[in-house]
Image (cartoon, grey):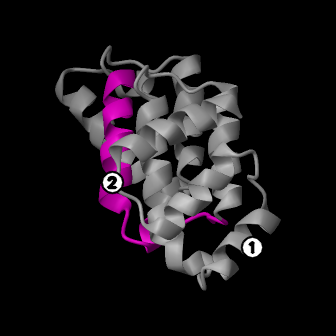
Amino acid sequence: MEKIKEVVKELLASRNYSSCMTRTLDLILNDKMNSLELSSCLSDNNYSIDDIKEEALSLIIDYSKVILEDGIITKDEMRNISMLKLFYRIKEGEFFEFGKKEDVTDVLLQQLRKLYADDTIDRGEAIMKTELQELFGLCYDDFLEINNIAAKEALERGADVSKLDTII
């Protein structure tokens, strides 16, 4: 929970969120990250979760960028992302549904290009690819489309397709 707070503080200092979204982030900072507190906060301000959904998706993309700076996703970071998605009631497919495909693609490609840099995907990297897919709640086909951009770049460099852990 401390890592969530740390990143949320960083994002509040560097991003401009709406007043309602800022109130929901304050819930996180004040150890009130639960559905009852969120519902109360939203209703007190005449908002629904749908009113901040797009902004919540942007928050999770921003959060993902911060945690992926080191190129690693820990179990705690995955759990924190899951908690944020649960808190903001984000469902599979909503990143694309709410027009965040380009942002998600940018984040994923940055990470996938690091994984494919040596023209091979080992077991640990294959697991990370699965975690990246889960991070944004993407279906297999949507993730594969993005993944194959980086895989094709590796193939153009001369990589062996059998070492890339993908279907092209």
Which residue has dot 1 on it? 40
Chain-order first, disc 2 or disc 1: 1
Number of residues whose C-alpha sits closer than 10 Å to that of mark 2, classed few (under 14), some (14–19) or many (20 or more): some
Query: In this rendering, which labeled residue sits more in front, label 2 or label 1?
Result: 1
Residue 103's mark? 2
Query: Mark 1: few, some, or many residues within 10 Å (few <14, many ≥20)?
Result: few
Place of residue 71 in the rendered image (x, y in percent of width and height, measured from the top left): 44, 22
The residue lying toward the viewer, choosing from 45 and 153, is 45
State how far apart marks 2 and 1 are (Cα): 30 Å
Q: Quadrant of residue 4?
A: top right
Residue 157 among magenta residues: no
Look at the numbered disc 2 and give the secondary structure of its residue: helix
Which amino acid, by three-letter code, is at mark 2? Asp
Amino acid type at image mark 1: Ser
Magenta stretch, residue numbers = 89-116
Please tell me which residue is depicted at 60% across the width and 63% down the height of the picture: 92
Main SS category, magenta section: helix
Which of 83 and 140 lies nearest the eye of the viewer? 83
Q: Determine the residue positioned at 52% across, 69% down.
A: 20
**Residue 113 left/right relative to 76:** left
Q: What is the total number of numbered labels drawn onto the structure image? A: 2
Q: Residue at x 58, y 53 (%)?
A: 25
The picture places residue 54, in percent across and down from the top left corner, at 45, 69
Looking at the image, residue 40 lies above or below residue 108: below
